Image (cartoon, grey):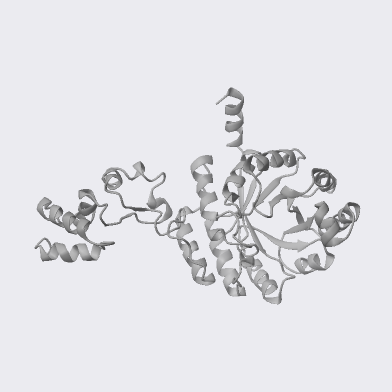
Amino acid sequence: MSFKSYVRWCLLRSVQIYLLDSTLREGEQSPGVSFSPEQRTEIALALDDFGVEFIEVGHPAVSDDVLEGIRLISEQGLKANLLAHSRALRRDIDLILDLNVDWVGIFFCLSNSCLQRRFNITLDQALGRIENAILYAKDHGLRVRFTPEDTTRTEWRNLERALNLARELKVDRVSIADTTGSAHPFYFYELTERVVGFGIPTNVHCHNDLGLALANAVMGIEAGATVVDATINGIGERVGIVDLAQISTILYYHYGLRHYKLERLYEMSQMLQEITGIRMQKNYPITGENAFVHKAGLHVSAVVKDPAFYEFLPAELFGRERSIYLDKYAGRDSIRFYLERMGIRDEKITRKLLSIVKSSQGAFTPERLLEEARRMGGVE
């Protein structure tokens, strides 16, 4: 690492980075997901306890139950900043003004393709709409985040004019949206760096269509963005956005941010799976069922001495327990791991059980191991 790079690395780690959770807005755009007002409140309370700095509570113009859910959340006295989503329309903003919400997130797509084929207006007309909406929101006391939708595919000339306008209007934050999840991380870094150069605090909102959402979020941080959007379990439109568990763990492990309650991540993931019916892959990072399960005998022999050999952070930090999976890959330490919990320290039984496990077809459960040990006289 060069000296210049080292200095930048040190400076970056002195900058505070924040999390915005969008489960209640982006997350509800997942196919098959619809939150009741009570469920919205339950999720918001969990997020506030976890420690996110911003909660995007929804788009009140979508439906009456979204509006009612936002109203309920706003009455809970949460510590997090509450942000409501809005088109660049006064009628959307008027709905937000009736709620106890401090932030509005105004969005509008400015790519030539959208302007010509979707809205049939000029760039000047679009900027006029955006200006009117921002001024209206600010005149009524709201803090404003402006998002040029599909930022990563919008022509720079258009973005430049929008960012200059945002700066003139003293917009509080701008957000870079990789709406189709297709940006290359190096390009995302360069774009974020250019946007940050306008002097407006910057968010990143990264979709996961190419599996690059987390990589792009990290590149956004490295380029100077100070807020990352995420959702519980990474749910959202199509294949979702950045996963809250993964980005908060990265902030803990790589950036030294220790104020999030990582021990709440697993229970939040389970809660959302119950509410939505969307089940996570077993091998999903951090909150997946296999995240702290060790199988290969050589791995297990190391883990029983020190979990750090195969866990970059301990299971206990996440409120979880590590376990050992038993099948033909097991070694003696795999068997001892369970026998010692049963109070058995008999190498003869260990060897016999290992032989049985290795010759069995499929998984060998701890309960079955106990039964075999009892049959051998190792357990009263």
Residue appearing at x 37%, y 53% in the figure: 292
Quadrant where the N terminus sits is: top right
Is the residue 4 above or below the residue 361 in the image?
above
Q: Where is residue 360 in the image (x, y as percent from the top left)?
A: 22, 61
Q: Where is residue 187 in the image (x, y as percent from the top left)?
A: 67, 41
In the displayed structure image, the side of residue 357 where residue 242 appears, left or right? right
Q: Nearer the viewer, residue 210 or 35?
A: 210
Q: Nearer the viewer, residue 226 or 110?
A: 110
Is the residue 146 above or below the residue 187 in the image?
below
Quadrant where the C terminus sits is: bottom left
Q: Position of residue 274 (x, y in %)?
A: 49, 70
Total residue callouts: 0
Asked whether the viewer can see residue 67, the reply is yes
Q: Which of 94 and 368 is in front in this view?
A: 368
Q: Quadrant of residue 63?
A: bottom right
Residue appearing at x 54%, y 40% in the figure: 255
Q: Which of 343 and 120 is in front in this view?
A: 120
Asked whether the viewer can see residue 136, the reply is no
In the displayed structure image, the side of residue 18 where residue 137 appears, left or right? right
Is the residue 221 above or below the residue 367 in the image?
above
Q: Position of residue 150 (x, y in %)?
A: 73, 53
Q: Quadrant of residue 64?
A: bottom right
